[in-house]
Image (spheres, rainbow, N blue to C red):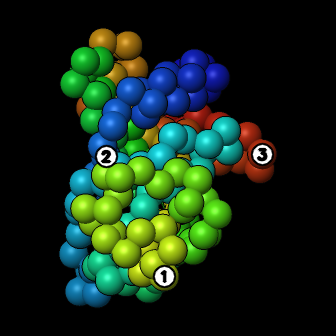
Amino acid sequence: MDTERLLTLARRLVGEVTFCVAVTQSECGDSNARVVQPRPLQDDWTVDFITNRRCRKVRDVKRTSRMTLLYQGDQDLSYVCLVGAAEVVDDLQLKRSIWTPAHYRWNPGGPDDPATIFIRLKTERIELWSAVQDVLPPPEGYSAALLLRDGDGWRYSAS
């Protein structure tokens, strides 16, 4: 499979989705999943979202330093998973620059509240599957196309 085509398609599909599912590992090893509204994907495949320091996902990320973001695209019958290292980021300037009135619902203290933070994912692995875009790796489309970070670039790997 063509790595550049897959990267372009994955970036487009992620960009079309407003909400995604953030998955972390709980203390007992179970998966914790919740809907989040990520910021736009950066050129280096880093993505972050605002949350509150008191949330369970923050504790999970601090403990494991790992997270998966799952984007589902109904229009393309597709999904993209971004998997990688995660960290808690407290960047006051960034909070102020992207703050909207809608953020007050979950973070009533505003951007200056120390409880309002970001979780940042640094993507190391991309999984992509799309029926409409014919990304259906063998055997018979049962697995996703898998891209692994390789230095400054990406390489395709059979999943």
Q: Which mark is residue 114?
A: 1
Residues at discs 3 and 2 in contact (Cβ within 8 Å): no
Q: Can residue 154 be seen in this view?
A: no
Select label 3 or label 2 by which is in front: 2
**Label 1 to label 3: alpha-carbon separation:** 34 Å
Q: Position of residue 146 (x, y in %)?
A: 48, 39
Q: Position of residue 128 (x, y in %)?
A: 41, 33
Q: Is mark 3 on a helix, strand or loop?
A: loop
Select label 1 or label 2 by which is in front: 1
Q: Position of residue 36 (x, y in %)?
A: 31, 54
Location of residue 132 with respect to 24 vertically, above or below:
above
Quadrant of the image occupied by residue 2:
top right
Q: Which mark is residue 152?
A: 3
Select label 1 or label 3 by which is in front: 1
Q: Which mark is residue 133?
A: none
Q: What element carries label 1?
A: loop
Residue at numbered disc 2? 20
Q: Label 1 amino acid?
A: Pro
